[in-house]
Image (cartoon, coloured by chain):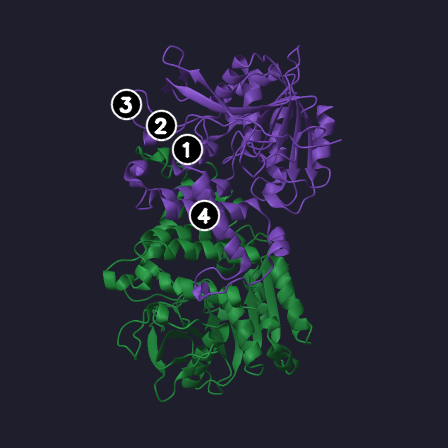
Chain colours: A purple, B green
Amino acid sequence: MTGSLGYVEQQRVVLATEDDPLLLRGGARLDEVEVAFETYGRLSPARDNAVMVCHALTGTAHAAGLHLGAKKRGWWDNLIGPGKALDTDRFFVVSANLLGGCSGTTGPLSRNPATGTPYFLDFPLLHMSDLVAVHRRLLAHLGIERLYAAVGGSLGGMQVLQWVIDDPEQIDRAVVVAASSRLTPENIAFSSVAREAIMNDPEFHGGRYVEHGTVPRLGQKVARMMAHITYVSNASLETKFGHRRDSTGDDWRMGPDFAVEHYLQHQGETFLDRFDALSYLYLTRLLDYFDPFSDPWTEERLRSCSTRFQVTSFDSDWRFDTAQSQALAAGLERYGVKVDLAELSSPFGHDSFLLEPPGYHERIAAFLD
Amino acid sequence: MTGSLGYVEQQRVVLATEDDPLLLRGGARLDEVEVAFETYGRLSPARDNAVMVCHALTGTAHAAGLHLGAKKRGWWDNLIGPGKALDTDRFFVVSANLLGGCSGTTGPLSRNPATGTPYFLDFPLLHMSDLVAVHRRLLAHLGIERLYAAVGGSLGGMQVLQWVIDDPEQIDRAVVVAASSRLTPENIAFSSVAREAIMNDPEFHGGRYVEHGTVPRLGQKVARMMAHITYVSNASLETKFGHRRDSTGDDWRMGPDFAVEHYLQHQGETFLDRFDALSYLYLTRLLDYFDPFSDPWTEERLRSCSTRFQVTSFDSDWRFDTAQSQALAAGLERYGVKVDLAELSSPFGHDSFLLEPPGYHERIAAFLD
């Protein structure tokens, strides 16, 4: 029987200090790294049932269950819980906010111990390996040496891939959904326009907008509205909104009139409350440079890799399409890594990985079994 | 033998006055309409060799040849000229800037005769039929009753479709390339984000930016950068730029680094010089509402239509894809209109209609023969 987790609590832990700093792939050093995380289920006495969940670009550690007083369940609540694909009666699921984020883990708005003020744009550029390194420290803190599985969608799937490359022994099963091993020029182009909008917003103030008591509202909203179009499919927009017009006032002349426009407005507005523009810059930039198969170390590491991969794409996903999952799988198979690759049918575009298209959760459950 | 037109001159003519105003489909009235146009070739004594060229969203009347002192040829110079598909040794080609534009024809920045100041956002919303009406007046001014052909790509193709519906007797051959008879919700969504960026730019000043000596630079640039991505294909970006990085200075951290980013910057910057933000608002809005086959008059008009249509799509065009050309053709065929529909192979995305993919110009030439 499947059910939902009840109330869950978020925890925080300091994982790097001046005495034990985090050395970043690009050469910089972080003297203080705090991580926000949640766990669901119980770690077995043998410590062999841990499953790490890696979130996407704008995700949080709150993957499942409810926070006290909140109405909205975690972003992957349909996948994680008693009797679900990530069965919390069986697995100890760990979910953490990523480095550079803005939901509890150290990021550009965190205090720079060297100056006592937020880093802003002095925060170092991040490599996917840096995100992995932080999560590996979290596992060490939790006393977990090996993962039964690591599961991620979109950026989260890319983090799982990097993790296996960085330590080909830690993860038994890697579940990579709607991801890519290298962004296309089109992917980079969209992210570039988003950054252009944010950084040229007069309220950006060179990244120090917090000191001015403001946020680059125009740029961040536009960035999200545009990105959101790439997360869905035209077919799903047709089904959901078609050509329906929803306006009541006079604003319709040039302002939102069609239902799809009001929907995008809502997506853009709510994004302002839940995400930070600097984190958006750092994490989109990290994705632009993600290219593990061009790294000369990757081959040597993957040759000793015993992780089994499950790679899944969705036929309506045009942000990270099936060709990208195929390239990712081919990159692994070149070094003898076992990959179970499949394209699933789903009308929901890239967002499919957050939803329940037919066969999707069953496929993950079977792989974990 | 094919060649290029030499120097050409742009002309202007006033086509509506207070005594002979232009009544718009939406009920408003324009007491002054001026049109910028160019002609190439010679009108035959029988006046039966005229071909109208209709431009796309941000086009101009300057379709072919050179302006004195300028280096850049007209936007469709590869199609129009002696011995070319629109053979100026044979045809009298007319090209005009459309109503609502900003390149010589009356638009939102034109003087409102009622106030003596520019219209700004008081300019009336436009229907595709209004654009057609202005061009029909231009033909009357030139003494042309019937068109041997009308040719248009993207918005221009949609204008050709509307023209045939509005007067099913005036055009013998209609060439519609990379167009649509109704935008998809995704198309509308992209335009909505563009308008959001422009109208929320602090320099927009409620549309009166000219009075403030400024333009909504941030919004207009972002709008164009985003739109440009939809005009090309990822395959063409791969070929042209791949993952090449072009930065030299320090700006690359969050600013443009990849060649594709520099390219988009250039597209956005040059757009500021050549186009007006208000025209962009009006013309994208016009496209959102374009839906001629839902108009109850369309059936009656098309039943008496003897125009032959050639409809062409390109397989890499994801802005107005082949399904949209198929729907356009099906809408015509439902009423017995003859349509020659084909999808051509081209790697260049929507922009293919401006380029020379194999078979494209030959196809148009054959249809006009």
Chain of the residue that carries numbered disc 2 in the rendered image: A
Position of A158 with respect to B248 (left or right) is: right
Whichever of callouts 1 and 4 sits on the residue coming sooner in the sequence is 4
In contact (CB < 8 Å): disc 3 and disc 2? no
Q: Amino acid at mark 3?
A: Thr
Distance (Cα) linking label 1 and label 4: 21 Å
The image quarter containing residue A337 is top right
Q: Are marks 3 and 2 on the same chain?
A: yes
Q: Amino acid at mark 1?
A: Tyr
Given residues B119 and A321, the one toward you in this image is B119
- The circle drawn on residue A115 is 3
| Residue in the image at 44% along x and 41% along y | A273
Distance (Cα) linking label 2 and label 1: 9 Å
Whichever of callouts 2 and 1 sits on the residue coming sooner in the sequence is 2
Position of A53 with respect to B59 (left or right) is: right
Q: Amino acid at mark 4?
A: Glu
In contact (CB < 8 Å): disc 3 and disc 4? no
In contact (CB < 8 Å): disc 2 and disc 1? yes
Distance (Cα) linking label 3 and label 4: 33 Å
The image quarter containing residue B59 is bottom left
Q: Give the label, 3 or 1, closer to the camera.
A: 3
Whichever of callouts 3 and 1 sits on the residue coming sooner in the sequence is 3
Given residues A146 and B147, the one toward you in this image is A146
Position of B361 with respect to B270 (left or right) is: right
Whichever of callouts 3 and 4 sits on the residue coming sooner in the sequence is 3
Q: Are marks 1 and 4 on the same chain?
A: yes
Q: Amino acid at mark 2?
A: Phe
Q: Give the label, 2 or 4, closer to the camera.
A: 4
Chain of the residue that carries numbered disc 4 in the rendered image: A
Residue at mark 4: A269
- The circle drawn on residue A123 is 2
**Looking at this rendering, what residue extends furthest in the bottom direction?**
B19
